[in-house]
Image (cartoon, coloured by chain):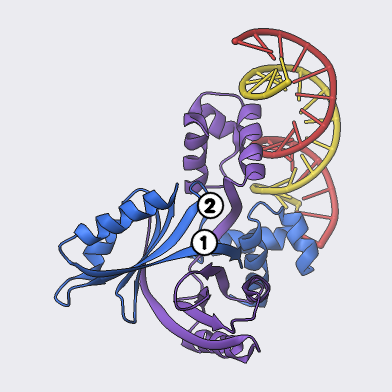
Chain colours: A blue, B purple, C red, D yellow
Amino acid sequence: MDELDRRILDILRRDARTPYTEIADEVGTSEGTVRNRVERMNEDGVIERFTVTTRTGNVKAMIEVGVAVDVETGEVSERMAEWEEVDFVWMVSGEQDIVLVVDAADTRGVNELITQAREQDEVVSTKTRLILDEHLG
Amino acid sequence: MDELDRRILDILRRDARTPYTEIADEVGTSEGTVRNRVERMNEDGVIERFTVTTRTGNVKAMIEVGVAVDVETGEVSERMAEWEEVDFVWMVSGEQDIVLVVDAADTRGVNELITQAREQDEVVSTKTRLILDEHLG
DNA sequence: TATGAAAGACTAACTAA
DNA sequence: TTAGTTAGTCTTTCATA
């Protein structure tokens, strides 16, 4: 992981379909070098996977969830990650313990997820924020 | 968005570099159809972007940023989205106005981002939470 | 790093619903 | 008129030197 790797990664993060030849031009090296480095990062697990991000639903929100003190958050959050319309589940430090990032079809969908969260035995509080707009880094 | 689109998306989510010909075989259609549909989903914004997920940084965090009342959050957040190590910038409802989701090499990296945020003229407060663990939905 | 073969993607003309 | 197919061409990737 040197500066060159990082620059290649930055380009791939913005568009993972950028041809090796174009990346090579941009960072000032050869196509082969770029290819070898991407392959190596892939094998080493630096690159987890090539994927697409989708915007299926239209209402995004963060649902912050507090759980009882005697509860294992890992188990609860794994369960929540399986719910439809949930993009990420994060275990976080701070007032709340778990944050769900959700992408629902409408506000009713968000509301159903909040309800679903509150119905869990382990959950003692929720706090929701709508995501009004998003910029990708 | 029909069943075929969804099946194509599922394959791309798992590996965005799967050739169109291979996707076509798997879903039982022609290469051209797959390509047309991916292009259409791309234009329609169903597919936001082709990207890589990395395991480089190991310290993820949410930096919640409050800005002055007379400030246009869109402009500030667009600027922040360009910063290194910033994955998403969300404009949100609630106490704070902007949330940065960051993926830094270490806690020092997170701290530098917090400092950078606080140095902006428009920023009046920040509040940071470390993301301790993550599950993908 | 340079080159050529192989694989994949793109163009455009065509067909069917 | 729109979605799908296919053949030919161009681009990218990959192995070899």
Front-most of A8 and B44?
B44
**If the image is split into quadrants, where does the N terminus of chain A sit?**
bottom right
Looking at the rendered structure, the secondary structure element under dot 2 is strand
Q: How dense is the environment of label 2, judged by Cα within 10 Å: few (below 14), some, or many (20 and up)?
A: many
Picture disc at residue A51: 2
What is the x, y in percent for residue B72? 66, 75
Up-down relation of residue A43 to residue B9 (above or below): below
Give the letter of the chain under mark 1.
B
Up-down relation of residue B29 to residue A33 (above or below): above
Picture disc at residue A126: none
What is the x, y in percent for residue B127? 45, 85
Give the letter of the chain under mark 2.
A
- Left or right of A103 on screen, residue C7: right
Residue type (three-letter) at the residue carrying disc 1? Thr
The residue to which callout 1 is attached is: B53
The residue under the point 61% across, 62% down is: A13
Quarter assignment of residue A12: bottom right
The residue under the point 44% across, 83% down is: B128
What is the x, y in percent for residue A117? 26, 59
Query: Disc 1 and disc 2: Cα gap in Å?
Result: 7 Å
Q: How dense is the environment of label 1, judged by Cα within 10 Å: few (below 14), some, or many (20 and up)?
A: some
